[in-house]
Amino acid sequence: MITRSALIWLSRQEGLKDFATSFGFFKKLTTRFVAGENIDEVIPFIRQINSENATASFDHLNESVGSAAEAEQEVLEYLDILAKIDEQRIRSNVSIKLTQFGLGLDPELAYQNARRVVVEAERRGNFVRVDMEDSSVTQVTIDIFRRLRAEFGLNTVGIVLQSYLYRTLADAQELVKLPARIRICKGAYNEPPEVAFPEKKDVDANYIKVMQLLLSSGTYHGIATHDPKMIDATIEFAAREGIGKEKYEFQMLYGIRRDLQHQLARDGFNVRIYVPYGKHWYPYFMRRLAERPANIWFVMKNLAKG
């Protein structure tokens, strides 16, 4: 199997993007999981998602920007996305990463940039999800989200938590008191055992604990997973507790387990698809593989599953 260090090295060689996409298999992989390089390429895919009784979330790819000017371009991109959602009458919200708004440069800059997007989303009656990144920025991400949530409504800004972190259950217990709309996912970064469960069974057990806490809170949350066991556990818990399908949504990534996406939508569940796009897809795609090289096999299997 290709090593993690090799994938990380490849992720830094964006000049290899054109070379890599000259190979049909690699191009098929990337176009399956990244919707395009600009917003106009993405809109038809979101129309298709909407036609299949699912909603979407735009995710513009560009993490860890290197300058305030680059962060400014990300803000302008998201303001344009929110305008296009209205103009095109598509059902979608947006997902942001604070590092793309300058978190690595200055947390206050990231907050102010994120706030500009949230202000525009509120004006347009839309919603911003503050995504979660690696554990080095977990606390500052929560801190910035709390500042935003103190000013903006429950249905304007939300956050993401990751079940592989030891701290997540306690974070969820505190955030539901605000209240806050939370997306729970397992997490895909390569974290040390000091901060994250090394074993999948423990990640899954924590996921179920947090999912049950969220569904019991009465707030509308996102249950983000492609794992049929986690989906079944969610459906079973909701049915047992009398929690209706309209009280939560399943969330999945564009191109992964489309069979499950379609089945859940047909069964009457709310489904939201996160749609990544942007010219920086190459480092994003390679880093996702590098975080867990086993993802290579996950991706290949999903090509066959549909």
Image (cartoon, helix red, strand yellow):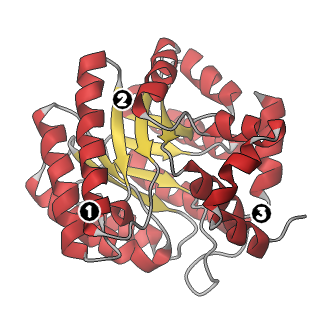
Q: Which mark is residue 293?
A: 3
The disc labelled 1 sits on which kind of residue?
Ala
Q: Which residue is mark 2?
A: 92
Q: Which mark is residue 18?
A: none
The disc labelled 2 sits on which kind of residue?
Ser
The secondary element bearing badge 2 is classed as: strand
State the quadrant of the C terminus. top right
The disc labelled 3 sits on which kind of residue?
Pro
| Residue at screen point 73% across, 38% down | 27
The answer to whether 253 is drawn above or below residue 287 in the figure is above
The answer to whether 285 is drawn above or below residue 50 in the figure is below
Could you say which is closer to the camera, residue 257 or residue 69? Answer: 69
- Which numbered disc flags the more N-terminal residue, 1 or 3? 1
C-alpha span from label 1 to label 2? 27 Å
Expressed as whole percent of the image width and height from the top left, the position of residue 264 reads 59, 25
C-alpha span from label 2 to label 3? 31 Å
The answer to whether 133 is drawn above or below residue 121 in the figure is below
Q: Which residue is mark 1?
A: 69
Q: Quadrant of residue 79?
A: top left
